[in-house]
Image: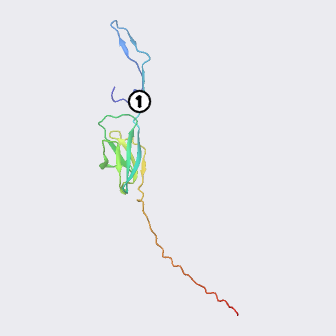
Amino acid sequence: MKNLSKKDSGRYQLRFLTNDGKGFSAEPGVILNVTDLQVRASRSAVASEGQTTVTLSCITSCTLSNNHTYMWYRNGQPVTDKLTKHNKLYLNSSEDAGNYSCAVRGREDLRSPELTVTCEPQNSVIILMYRVVIAQVQSSALTESSF
């Protein structure tokens, strides 16, 4: 069977025809449940040598053939320079911030829910130097002594 759709869901039985024109069906048969392709995205981040790379993965609910391409979208618009045969998208620039979703090419109507990618400033060390002046007052104690 090829190009199945939801309407093909149901119970299927194998029917055997005999030479006398009679036949019989194999019981109980099989139940076929066809569902829409479901796509989701996940993310992970790895920091190395002051650079953080965010990896987005497009995950499908079923195994696809090897001849598919993943489409990535940022803020609802196709990211045309990020077409990939693999299901991963690598981001490492602050300009890559946005809301990302993915789809399998040919089924762009079935996009994953969006993932938000934010870029935080790299860890910075801010040194504040204060000049502290300590005024030290020495007091002299005068004592009277009598002889």
Q: For residue 5, what is the image quadrant?
A: top left
Q: For residue 87, what is the image quadrant?
A: top left
Q: How many marks?
A: 1
Q: Give me the residue at 36% from left, 13% from top.
A: 16
Of 95 and 44, which appears nearest the observer? 44
- Residue 107 location (% of width, % of height): 35, 39
Quadrant the N terminus occupies:
top left
**Colour setting:** rainbow
Residue 113 sits above or below residue 145 on the image? above
Of 143 and 64, which appears nearest the observer? 143
Q: Give me the residue at 33% from left, 49% from top.
A: 79
Residue 90 sits above or below residue 60 on the image? below
Quadrant the C terminus occupies:
bottom right
Q: Spot the residue most to the bottom.
A: 147
Of 94 and 38, which appears nearest the observer? 94
Residue with the mark numbered 1: 34
- Residue 13 location (% of width, % of height): 40, 18
Give the amino acid at mark 1.
Val
Q: Spot the residue most to the right.
A: 147
Q: Give me the residue at 31% from left, 48% from top.
A: 82
Of 146 and 60, which appears nearest the observer? 146
Label 1 Cα neighbours within 10 Å, binned few <14 / some 14-19 / many ≥20: few
- Residue 118 location (% of width, % of height): 42, 54
Q: Secondary structure at mark 1?
A: loop
Residue 126 sits above or below residue 97 on the image? below
- Residue 125 location (% of width, % of height): 43, 64
